[in-house]
Image (spheres, helix red, strand yellow):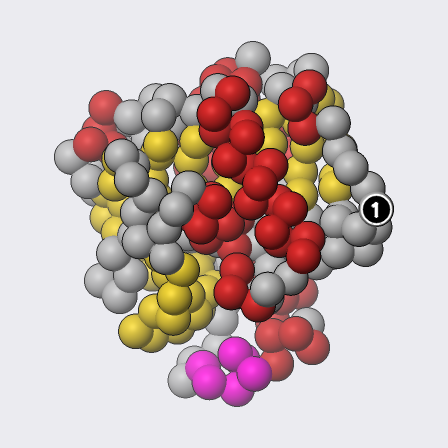
Amino acid sequence: MRVLAFRHVPFEHLGLIADSLNAHGLDYEYIDLHQSPATVPSADRAAGLIFMGGPMSVNDGLDYLGREQRLIADAAARGTPVLGVCLGAQLIAAALGSRVYENAVKEIGWAPVHFTEAAAHDPLFGGLFAPELLFHWHGETFDLPPGAVHLAYTRDCRHQAFRVGSNVYGLQFHLEVTPEMIAGWCEEDANEGDMRELTAPIDPHANAARLRELSDLVFGRWCRLVK
């Protein structure tokens, strides 16, 4: 069984998601449409699709992001498991007919995520009730797609996680990051503008141990959904 992971920049890769895929015996392949636009992945035969983050916007009019939205819509209709992280969640929202727009504030760094009552019985987030300190890096947000189940929120961004049907999940927060990834993001040229706006440095290790536990739980459950 093979999962296709759509990557938009090299530094926003699967991270801890790859550990869960490996632990559950799921092969995966990176698809980089921004580098190889002629590539046409056989997404209809994939066991699952993952769409990662990136500094670009759904609203930039980039051809490869439009292609990804069409793949998302087709996969959602087929019942193929789809997971989107940050930009990936925004792509899912847009693909399913919702608006993506600037959030009131940028969320960068560690911030508490609260779970809704619906999350308590969700296949991925079930059993999570108390707020969890998770990592964020985004300046945009989205309206929930029609029929979506709202799963999580923060003080500054209401739509942090959602499910559409039984097979499509969007996560605005970064549950996949390692301390090494966070440290690397802070040094990326593409993130230089965001870094200048911060009022305090980011500690990559602030909640890394708990983040890994939650990643194993949530992404492990997603892998079982794929299988």
Q: Is residue 107 above or below residue 72?
A: below
Disc 1 residue type (three-letter): Ala
Q: Is residue 170 above or below residue 164?
A: below
Q: Magenta region: which residues? A: 193-198
Residue nearer the viewer, 115 or 99: 99
Q: Quadrant of the N terminus?
A: top right
The answer to whether residue 194 is magenta is yes
Left or right for 211, reference 38: left
Q: Residue at x 43, y 31 (%)?
A: 168
Q: Is residue 191 above or below residue 75?
A: below
**Residue lying farthest top?**
227
The answer to whether residue 39 is magenta is no
Q: Is residue 134 visible?
A: no
Q: Residues within 10 Å of mark 1 (few under 14, many from 20)?
A: few
- Image spot of residue 66 (x, y percent): 60, 51
- Image spot of residue 134 (x, y percent): 39, 52
- Image spot of residue 19 (x, y percent): 63, 32
- Image spot of residue 70 (x, y percent): 58, 40
Left or right for 71, reference 83: right
Q: Quadrant of the C terminus?
A: top right
Predominant SS of the magenta segment: helix
Identify residue for label 1. 38
Q: Residue at x 61, y 45 (%)?
A: 68
Left or right for 144, reference 208: left
Q: Quadrant of residue 117?
A: top left
